[in-house]
């Protein structure tokens, strides 16, 4: 494949259609091509069997058709699977397939960037720096690969998508929206937007933009601390996006979309897991309907945070719950394969 040619997956549907028809092909050939690209996920023109050989040759000569190569996969004892992919330029990206407790539903955690620029103090991905934004098709292709795997291994399709892998989705806004379009479109994966959650470290103006653009997916804020001082120590992005501006943006998002909002909260022993921390969190839950997910921390080598013990997590959750707030404690999945929250770092040996 030759990356000097235009990437056919980066064109809009309209541009692909106009190009094919400009080459003299009928509209039904356009539909066939779209089916091969997004329904069947074929990443080689030669394998698009229903297209005439002349069209396959023309496409091959004119366009670049990039794909992801899965170079490493690992299965956890708890049923979680992690995939490492290389993109056409050799940069890494990772996805994690997570079964529900009953293994009757699978959630795929996708990455939107290779690496991440936000340097959260507890996160392995942040140590990589940002390598580059993913194209919409590269986000979608993580789904295609994992969905095939899920079907073959578990006889099921992926039910939910969360943008919680490598990267900050709202810093790759256009391509994340493009990938949501592919995931929800009848010509793509036909998933309901209600099954998709975009998780952000918190960029107020981009949250407002999601609302203005009428995006119908759920939104999760990686909160992790309920006061600015502690949050800034965990997440440098908080310096420019204080809690008051994030609350304002989330309220705006809720008022304009009615979409579900959740707070993700990793519990760190002795840092953000006291009763007082819980009461501060309760105050942040009074502005719009929100559910809280407490996440068990997975220690990352070289980082000083310690995971809260079970008693402290339970006491914290009890304090929040008694104010009528919906709160779930999520035991971490895939810890033994570094697939848990904050652990994706595309180690070069894997
Ligand atoms: S937690 Fe998310 S936003 Fe923060 S460094 Fe890691 S990947 Fe980036």
Image (cartoon, rainbow, N blue to C red):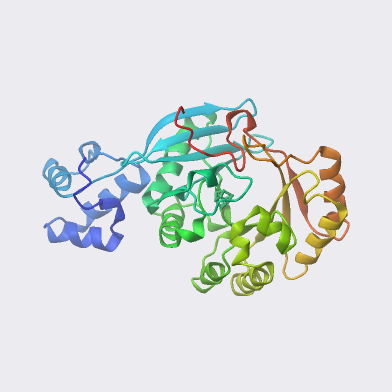
Residue at 62%, 64% in the rendered image: 239
Residue at 30%, 51% in the rendered image: 9
Query: Quick check: 67 left or right of 349?
Result: left
Q: Hey, which quadrant is residue 247 in on the image? A: bottom right
Q: Hey, which quadrant is residue 336 in on the image? A: top right
Residue at 68%, 38% in the rendered image: 332
Q: Is residue 288 visible?
A: yes
Q: Hey, which quadrant is residue 342 in on the image? A: top right
Q: Give the percent coordinates (x, y) of residue 82.
A: 52, 33
Q: Is residue 165 visible?
A: no
Q: Nearer the viewer, residue 33 or 244?
A: 244
The relative height of residue 225 versus residue 57 in the rendered view (above or below) is below
Query: Quick check: 194 left or right of 325?
Result: left
Q: Nearer the viewer, residue 224 or 300?
A: 300
Q: Give the percent coordinates (x, y) of residue 17.
A: 23, 59
Q: How many marks?
A: 0
Q: Nearer the viewer, residue 229 or 263?
A: 229
Query: Quick check: 236 left or right of 59?
Result: right
The relative height of residue 334 versus residue 170 in the rendered view (above or below) is above
Query: Quick check: 46 left or right of 81?
Result: left
Q: Give the percent coordinates (x, y) of residue 57.
A: 13, 43
Q: Give the percent coordinates (x, y) of residue 86.
A: 38, 37
Residue at 73%, 39% in the rendered image: 306
In what quadrant of the picture does the N terminus appear?
top left
Q: Nearer the viewer, residue 267 or 16?
A: 267
């Amino acid at each position: 494949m030759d990356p000097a040619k235009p990437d056919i997956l980066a064109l809009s549907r309209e541009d692909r259609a106009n190009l094919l028809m400009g080459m003299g092909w009928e509209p039904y050939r356009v539909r066939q091509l779209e089916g091969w690209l997004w329904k069947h996920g074929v990443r080689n023109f030669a394998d698009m069997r229903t297209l005439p050989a002349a069209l396959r040759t023309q496409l091959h000569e004119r366009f670049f058709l990039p794909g992801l190569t899965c170079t490493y996969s690992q299965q956890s004892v708890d049923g979680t699977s992690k995939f490492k992919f290389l993109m056409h330029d050799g940069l890494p990206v990772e996805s994690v397939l997570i079964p529900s407790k009953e293994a009757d539903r699978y959630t795929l955690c996708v990455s939107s960037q290779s690496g991440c620029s936000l340097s959260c103090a507890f996160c392995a991905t942040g140590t990589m720096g940002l390598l580059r934004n993913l194209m919409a098709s590269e986000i979608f292709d993580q789904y295609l690969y994992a969905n095939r795997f899920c079907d073959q291994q578990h006889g099921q399709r992926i039910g939910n998508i969360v943008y919680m892998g490598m990267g900050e989705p709202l810093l790759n806004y256009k391509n994340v929206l493009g990938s949501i379009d592919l995931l929800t479109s009848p010509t793509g994966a036909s998933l309901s937007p209600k099954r998709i959650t975009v998780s952000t470290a918190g960029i107020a103006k981009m949250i407002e933009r999601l609302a203005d653009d009428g995006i119908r997916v759920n939104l999760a804020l990686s909160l992790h601390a309920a006061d600015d001082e502690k949050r800034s120590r965990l997440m440098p992005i908080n310096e420019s996006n204080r809690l008051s501006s994030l609350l304002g943006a989330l309220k705006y998002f809720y008022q304009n979309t009615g979409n579900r909002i959740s707070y993700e909260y990793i519990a760190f022993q002795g840092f953000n897991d006291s009763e007082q921390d819980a009461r501060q969190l309760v105050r942040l839950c009074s502005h719009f309907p929100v559910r809280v997910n407490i996440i068990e921390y997975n220690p990352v080598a070289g980082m000083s945070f310690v995971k809260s013990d079970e008693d402290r997590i339970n006491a914290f959750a009890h304090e929040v719950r008694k104010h009528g707030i919906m709160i779930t404690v999520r035991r971490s999945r895939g810890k033994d394969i570094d697939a848990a929250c904050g652990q994706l770092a595309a180690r070069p040996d894997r």
